[in-house]
Amino acid sequence: MSTEQDSHSNYRRSLGTVSLTAVGLGSIIGSGWLFGAERAAALAGPAAIFSWVIGAVVALTIALTYTELGSMFPKAGGMVRYGQYSHGSLAGYLAAWANWIAIVSVIPGEATASIQYMSSWDFAWCKELYDGKELTGTGLALASVLLLFYFFLNWFAITLFAKTNTAITVFKVVVPVLTAGALMLAHFDTSNVTDHGGFTPNGWSSVFSAVAVAGIVWAFNGFQSPLNMAAEARNPGKSMPKAVIGSILIALVIYIALQIAFLMAVPAGDLADGGWASLGYNSPLADLAMAWGLNWLAILLYADAFVSPSGTGMIYAATTSRMIHGVQENGHLPGVFGKVDAKTGVPRPALLLNLAISFIFLAVFRGWGSIAEIVGVATVISYITGPVAVMAMRRLAPGLPRPVKLRAMPVIAPIAMIFGSLVMYWARWPLTGKVIFIMAIGLPVWAWYELRKPWAELKPHLTAGAWMVTYLLVMAFVSWAGGKEFGGKGYLAEGWDILVVSLIALAFYYWGVASAWRNPSLVQVEKEMAAAADDEQAESAEEGREKAVSAV
């Protein structure tokens, strides 16, 4: 048995469909629902409702590509592996780096969200936790305590994680539903939709931008958590697709209800000067509850501001440790980060690394909004490998078992690539450029491990990964030159810019699929899967013989 197989044998296959759905839904319903409705409304006004729908469609389309990949390769940290299997080390590393940045930064983001809500408590010391833009020193200290709590719950066992998370998820679903209903009953002012600039006060471009930077991508990004826990799924082929798709659809209904409730509950006086763009609540939903005399709801929201983000932070602490394990097995981190504790089934060294990185993010990005923007764009960059990898694997490894295989995937995959590219463009320049620069920061790590290899061995990895490097550079240029409504120089006219981005996405999609190759990582995982299948057949045969002997 290889070292990698041995490490995976330490994981406990204890998560069923319900637990995995709770993981997905618990990741999606975190701090996004506490702040997303206000941030989306501030950008897009009442049309923010459509931002949530667009975000869900984008996430669902991309998720469908990853469910096939996840069912094929039910391994820990699945999302960081697929690009490596299809295109080798360069594209695989860039995809893994983007995905890890997007996910690990959520952890301090959830802690920040809890403390930011806490700043609205009616105590003098609470008012000093947040200055309106970022956490103060005291706020950072309390957020650091929350980070330690998230990781402490993950330190001991996956079964403790599953039991705790399922209970927390139930609470996290009930409270948003109750909040939406209570606010609608307390105040439902339909004139908010027509007054203060109308339904789209800032135009449709703001509706699209809200998808990328208002925390909507942040929210729906949770769909990938079940995929990263694949090594601990009892029946990944059946349970993962149900968990991924189910969690997105359930969350969409909840988010739309919350957005409608928020839009109708905002007092007209708060919109009198500056309209929707002037909104600036520290604790949006709790502030509205207090405004309409729902003190009991405000107290519940203050409590949930710890439970919801903490539940999501706990999940992401678990899934990011599996991602680090996957990056190590891709060959881009020291071997210690691939170790899984045999007693608990937890990759503890990876857990500690993510804790350290989370502290760094907490110190640099001190407000929920600034973290949400970074997460949104980094997430989209990580998304683009799914549509390319899923079709590339159909060409490279048609014989591999696919418990999930959609006939429409040849249509879904290029559409998913277009959607992901559009969301990246909608994020607006210079944010897109900043996040693409963050992607470049990770390249020295790749170079340390890869550039020491002989040229003949390295060349095919560079050739196969060229499409992704070029794609990021082209998207940065288009974002800079694009429409002024998306922060660009205005060299591309409105409407034409959307067409240009779509055509670019299709061009790189076909380039990416064509450049995939049977690299050593793919060959190795095929051998492992064949060996695992042989072992399973041998065990079944042995069980059959034992039953036959018992019957005699």
Image (tube, rainbow, N blue to C red):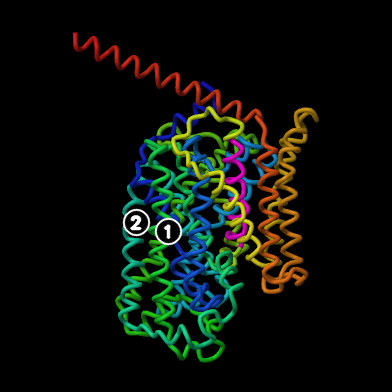
Per the image, label 1 sits on a secondary structure element best described as helix
Q: Residue furthest left?
A: 552
Magenta-drawn stretch, dominant element (helix, strand or loop): helix
Give the distance between the C-alpha atoms of the residues marked 2 and 1, in whole angstroms: 9 Å
- 292 or 156: nearer the viewer: 292
Q: Is residue 408 left or right of residue 453?
A: left
Callouts 2 and 1 close, C-beta under 8 Å: yes
Q: Is residue 367 visible?
A: no
Q: Quadrant of residue 293?
A: bottom left
Type of amino acid at the residue the image marks with label 2:
Ile
Place of residue 357 in the rendered image (x, y in percent of width and height, measured from the top left): 59, 52
**What percent of the width, then of the height, locates residue 143?**
50, 63
Q: Quadrant of the C terminus?
A: top left
Q: Is residue 528 above or below residue 472?
A: above
Image location (x, y in percent) of residue 218: 52, 60
Amino acid beneath label 1: Ser
Which residues make up the magenta segment? 374-393
Front residue of 216 and 447: 216
> Residue 244: image x %, image y %?
43, 49
Q: Which mark is residue 168?
A: 2
Question: In this picture, is 539 found above or below 481?
Answer: above
Relative to 478, is 279 on the left or the right? Answer: left
Looking at the image, which residue is at 56% across and 64% down?
372
At x 54%, y 42%, the residue is 350
At mark 2, the secondary structure is helix
Q: Which mark is residue 467?
A: none
Q: In this picture, is 461 found above or below 227?
A: above
Which image quadrant is residue 550 in? top left
Asked if residue 193 shows in the view, the reply is yes
Name the N-terminal-most of marks 2 and 1: 2
* Residue 197 is inside the magenta segment: no
Q: Which residue is mark 1?
A: 310
